[in-house]
Image (tube, rainbow, N blue to C red):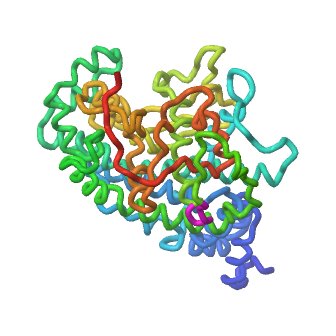
Amino acid sequence: MLLSKTGSPEIIAHILSNCDTFTDVLALTLTCKHVHMIWVENSSTIIHHIAKTTIRCFEDALMAARATEIVIAAYRRGEQPPDPFPIVELGTEFKKPDLVELKAVCNLQHLVRCFEYMFLNPPHGSISADIPNRNDKEGWEVWKDTFYRAAYRSMLVGAVIYKAFNEPFYLAEKEGRTEFVEHCVGPSNQNWEDWLSSITESDIDYLRKFAVYNFDAEDESTIGKWSWNEYKKVFGPLADWLVEDGKIKGVQDKLGQDEPEEVDEVNPEPDEPLQPPYDSAELGVFRDIMLLIATYEHFPNKLTKEYRHDNWKSTESEPLVRKSPRKASVILFGRFCIEEILMPEVVGDVGCLLATQSLAPESAPGSVDILSVIHALQSKSTRPNLHDGRPGPPPIFQFLVYVLRIHFHLKFVPGLFDWWSDSDYAYQVTSGSIFWVTEFTPFVEYSPPVLSYSG
């Protein structure tokens, strides 16, 4: 009789909160109006209680969903996202989730499951990454937690710094710079060479007014100092939050507390300088930095713009979506655009690629391909393109460069991004081993990089 009309609301709410699944909650709320009303009045608390035990990395997923919705809502109003971005308002400590947010989280979770399936089932041959042994259940739980959290962190960071990379195109439209917007958007059927030739010196000069597009300047030069001051405004609040959160999780996960490997001090490995011992808190932040890079290497290449709502079929060699799709709206780190990704209802039906389309019309500023614009800047730039004689960090990683320098006085190891098949970067990041062996710390003490031109 606990669920009858005379049942205590507090007890019924407690029973609903302790259901194993949301399906059980639905079944109970349909028993009578009294229970349904208690569900309505306590839905956020009940959702939070169940979701945090049934949805992997729920807090991270919810923060990503909320950050994405803030950007989308601003876009639909014809505005830029708020500045500063309300990072502290994204978690459950500020507000418990509602039904709309639960649906958004479930869609993001489904997308990550698709990414997971695609990662573990590559189309050509076996997986090259280090992963847990088949029967290592505990290991797989750790791997999944790392993979899912990295995916949600990519969506969160992508949303928070979306404004920095899209501001030139938003302001250009407001200022009536129609040619600039047209040049940067370009028609969808235009090839790279023709599109690149349409980018003018005037376009480049305008882009350089924004710090995230004013890269490859000497750190101690006037332009370099200006850029770093602007980075503090653009990246500072998110960097502070990322460092604090990473340190907490690093300590919780006891990173770096395994038995240290013995080092041959008499005959050390050549060209392998010993790294300083990082504590668990520092390793937590470094893990997040490298996992963000890994998501950039692994998620965008699983998306294609070639298929629309009316064209879900594909060739037999690259099956795409075989049934009516689900949708998830995201802003991925490194892409920095609002896009809607289509997914099969059954994860196992996913093929080699997932269809994606920009929320903005093709000719609108919101549909600019950020990475292509950056590549165009690099191609047309007269600035040095080598750091300490090697390719520097990709400009798309400026946020991570900022975190390392400002919070740890570190920088990426010179040559880290000078990719070759047997490099540490290829083994750890490009292969995806970083999702399992996360303590990869390719950093050295910061010093202003010496810039030069490639031969």
Give x and y (percent) for residue 430: 59, 34
Marker count (numbered): 0
In the displayed structure image, the side of residue 77 where residue 270 appears, left or right: right
Give x and y (percent) for residue 117: 69, 36
In the displayed structure image, the side of residue 356 where residue 84 appears, left or right: left
Give x and y (percent) for residue 154: 51, 48
The residue nearer to you, when weighing 335 against 170, is 335
**Would residue 361 be visible to someone looking at this image?**
no
Q: Residue at x 62, y 75 (%)?
A: 38
Q: Quadrant of residue 30?
A: bottom right
Kindly give the residue lying farthest to the right in the view shown.
Answer: 135
Check residue 279 for magenta coloring. yes
The residue nearer to you, when weighing 128 against 417, is 417
Q: Residue at x 76, y 53 (%)?
A: 141
Q: Which residues are magenta?
A: 277-282
Give x and y (percent) for residue 83: 29, 60
In the displayed structure image, the side of residue 212 where residue 109 appears, left or right: right
The image shows residue 86, relative to residue 191, as above or below, that is below
Q: Residue at x 43, y 68 (%)?
A: 89
Q: Quadrant of residue 118?
A: top right
**Would residue 137 be visible to someone looking at this image?**
yes
Q: Quadrant of residue 193?
A: top left
The residue nearer to you, when weighing 7 against 313, is 313
The image shows residue 288, relative to residue 428, as above or below, that is below
Check residue 215 for magenta coloring. no
- Give the position of the C terminus as an image quadrant: top left
- Give the position of the N terminus as an image quadrant: bottom right
Kindly give the residue lying farthest to the front in the view shown.
Answer: 266
